[in-house]
């Protein structure tokens, strides 16, 4: 399947699941050479077409009718550092972001989905979107874990397969919802 079509499908899934707003989030797939396919900046993510996807080289140059995602520095930093990474997905998962911003510790071992999809979660602090600082912090966190929560911002997942990266983001959001609902239903304080 054309990687550009795959990226369009992934962004539609993220939007339909409420994991990003119309203009938010981004994803990329590594090509067979020194390039990636990456979603564009400021384009409605639920309506992307293959010709909207930007071809970006690892040196930072790009070809496309739109600019690459504001987070392209982060994507490039990850790809330059880890040959095994074939895909990067970044969503603005609201429940995951809330739970981790509250400083709540989630025992991933309690949930079946995490045993299959999420080996661990790293958390990075608040950095400006699109900044070199954010790119470096996420890149460093990926060396410890393929799923990274960005405080006040969202989630990044990397994998050798884009659908595994997407699945980890969806699974973490579901786990955070279950965790939060269980805490609320039991009347226990959210601080654990």
Image (cartoon, rainbow, N blue to C red):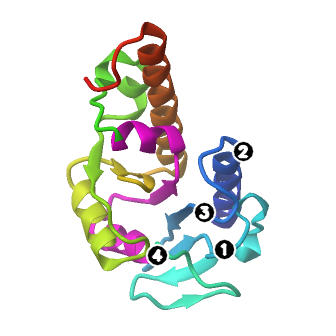
Answer left or right for 58 relative to 47: left
**Residue that appears at 30% across and 20% down:** 109
In space, the residues marked 2 and 4 are separated at their CA atoms by: 23 Å
Q: Mark 1 or mark 3, which is nearer to you?
A: 3
Q: Which residue is mark 1?
A: 53
- Measured along the vertical axis of the image, is residue 163 above or below residue 90? above
Label 2 neighbourhood size at 10 Å, few (<14), some (14-19), many (20+)? few
- Which secondary structure, mark 2? helix
Q: Which residue is mark 2?
A: 16
Q: Which residue is mark 4?
A: 72
In space, the residues marked 3 and 4 are separated at their CA atoms by: 13 Å
Instruction: Identify the residue at the far top of this view.
Output: 186
- Which secondary structure, mark 1? loop
Image marks 2 and 4: residues in contact by CB distance under 8 Å? no
Where the N terminus falls, by quadrant?
A: bottom right
Label 1 neighbourhood size at 10 Å, few (<14), some (14-19), many (20+)? many
How would you classify the magenta stretch by its main secondary structure? helix
Q: Mark 3 or mark 4, which is nearer to you?
A: 3
Image marks 3 and 4: residues in contact by CB distance under 8 Å? no
Answer left or right for 99 relative to 170: left
Label 4 neighbourhood size at 10 Å, few (<14), some (14-19), many (20+)? many
Residue 137 visible to an observer of this rendering: yes
In space, the residues marked 4 and 1 are separated at their CA atoms by: 13 Å
Asked whether 137 or 32 is in front, the reply is 137
Asked whether 119 or 134 is in front, the reply is 134
Disc on the earlier residue, 2 or 4: 2
In space, the residues marked 1 and 2 are separated at their CA atoms by: 19 Å
**Residue that appears at 61% across and 76% down:** 41
Is 80 magenta? The answer is yes
User: Which region is colored magenta?
Assistant: 72-101
């Amino acid at each position: 399947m054309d990687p550009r079509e795959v990226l369009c499908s992934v962004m539609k899934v993220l939007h339909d699941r409420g994991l990003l707003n119309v203009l938010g989030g981004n994803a990329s797939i590594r090509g067979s050479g020194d390039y990636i396919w990456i979603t564009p900046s400021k384009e409605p993510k639920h309506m992307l077409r293959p010709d909207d996807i930007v071809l970006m080289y690892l040196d930072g140059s790009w070809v496309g009718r739109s600019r690459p995602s504001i987070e392209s520095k982060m994507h490039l930093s990850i790809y330059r550092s880890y040959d095994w990474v074939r895909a990067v997905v970044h969503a603005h998962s609201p429940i995951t972001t809330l739970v981790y911003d509250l400083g709540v510790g989630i025992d991933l071992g309690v949930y079946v989905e995490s045993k299959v999809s999420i080996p661990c979660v790293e958390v990075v602090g608040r950095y400006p979107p699109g900044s070199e600082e954010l790119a470096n912090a996420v890149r460093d966190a990926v060396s410890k874990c393929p799923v990274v929560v960005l405080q006040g911002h969202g989630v990044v997942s990397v994998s050798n397969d884009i659908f595994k990266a997407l699945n980890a983001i969806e699974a973490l959001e579901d786990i955070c919802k279950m965790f939060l609902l269980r805490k609320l239903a039991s009347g226990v304080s959210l601080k654990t």
